[in-house]
Amino acid sequence: MPGVARRTILVLTSSLALLSGCSEGHVRFPVTERAQASLPSDVQVIRLDASNIASFERPAEPHRATALPKAGRWAYRIGSGDLLGIVVFDHPELTMPAGPEAKAGENSFRVQADGTIVYPYVGSIRAEGRGPEEVREELRERLAAFVPDPQVDVRVLGFQSQAVSVTGEVETPNRQPLTTVALTLLDAINAAGGLTEAADTRRVTVRRGGHSYRVDLDGFLSAGLGQNNPVLRPGDIVTVPRRRAEEAYLLGEIVKPAAVDLSLEPLTLTQALTRQGGILERRADARGVFVFRGNSGSGMTVFQLDARSPTALLLGTRFLLQPSDVVYVTRAPLSRWNDTISDLLPTVGAAGSVDRLGAN
């Protein structure tokens, strides 16, 4: 064998060995059942098909009813600082104790710090902790000694004793007074300007009586869980947290490998691949569309989708991704070989130049 040819073979052999080692730098995972038999025992491979796809249609975190204690029917109770409007029909001297020229605020009775109001003729009446109708009934009974068959109306004109606070990812965090109309969680958030774009509706908290309760408001909005839109109570503090990034990662032979955010909406495997341009058909091994998912303990589960048929892509529309999933599309053997040849060509050209120089 001529020395020049021998040198060329040596260069090619060395290049193949080098490229063989480099090619192992790419992530590779066996696509055949036979090859997967040699995987470690803590790696479980599940092939997605029509018989098991229903198990993976449910979101990773289903909606749950809140543990916030359910309260009974809402009834407003008068408190210190409230302003009461009291009308005794046909008796203006009792209706407007400050006189006909009085200002609007002067025509009401403020509940004192001790929880009472002072009314003409009858004196002190306890109002705190009672409903307007209870105060009205006592006033009617006690005025009957001075006014024949008194017709009395009692209303709360100024709700100042009880309120809730709404903080966090709402447009205008504020303090909202409670009134005779029940205030639900959703109403309170709307009264605070609504949610911001960064709000996490699944992890709203209501602090009540020294305890914090998680409320999945999205469970009410999208799943109809009525208890997840509770009626708020005096002193409740509502906090809407910022949404945490919950990402899945698309790698390998994909047009635009990237991380996709799952916190905005559930995403299926096919949706995620499509939004990133799909798989590179000339380079990808359609048998090797994998989803790597870590187990809660140790090891991992690998879901395999054989995407060579349209039926498989339909299966992918039912497979919901979970946070921290890694989607990887492997390279086809022919693509790996083509890459090897492409990397060899400059080396072969260099070897030819060496031969020519040797011949000269």
Image (spheres, rainbow, N blue to C red):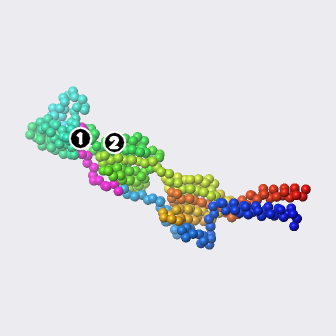
Identity, as a three-letter code, of the amino acid under mark 2? Gln
With 143 as the anchor, is 74 left or right in this view? right
Q: Nearer the viewer, residue 251 or 179?
A: 251
Task: Please identify the quadrant where the N terminus is shown.
Answer: bottom right
Q: Residue at x 78, y 62 (%)?
A: 12
The quarter of the picture where the C terminus appears is bottom right
Is 82 magenta? The answer is yes
Per the rendered image, the range of residues in magenta is 67-85
Answer yes or no: is residue 226 visible.
Answer: no
Label 1 crowd (10 A; few <14 / some 14-19 / many >=20): many
Outermost top residue: 101
What numbered label is drawn on residue 313? none
For the residues labelled 1 and 2, the Cα–Cα distance comes to 16 Å
- Nearer-N-terminus badge (1/2): 1
Q: Position of residue 161 (x, y in %)?
A: 27, 41
Tell me where residue 101 appears, x and y as whole percent.
21, 27
Residue tagged 1: 80
Q: Is residue 193 above or below residue 224?
A: above
The residue indicated by pointer 2 is 176
Identified at 12% across, 38% down, the residue is 122
Q: Nearer the viewer, mark 1 or mark 2?
A: 1
Q: Secondary structure at mark 2?
A: strand
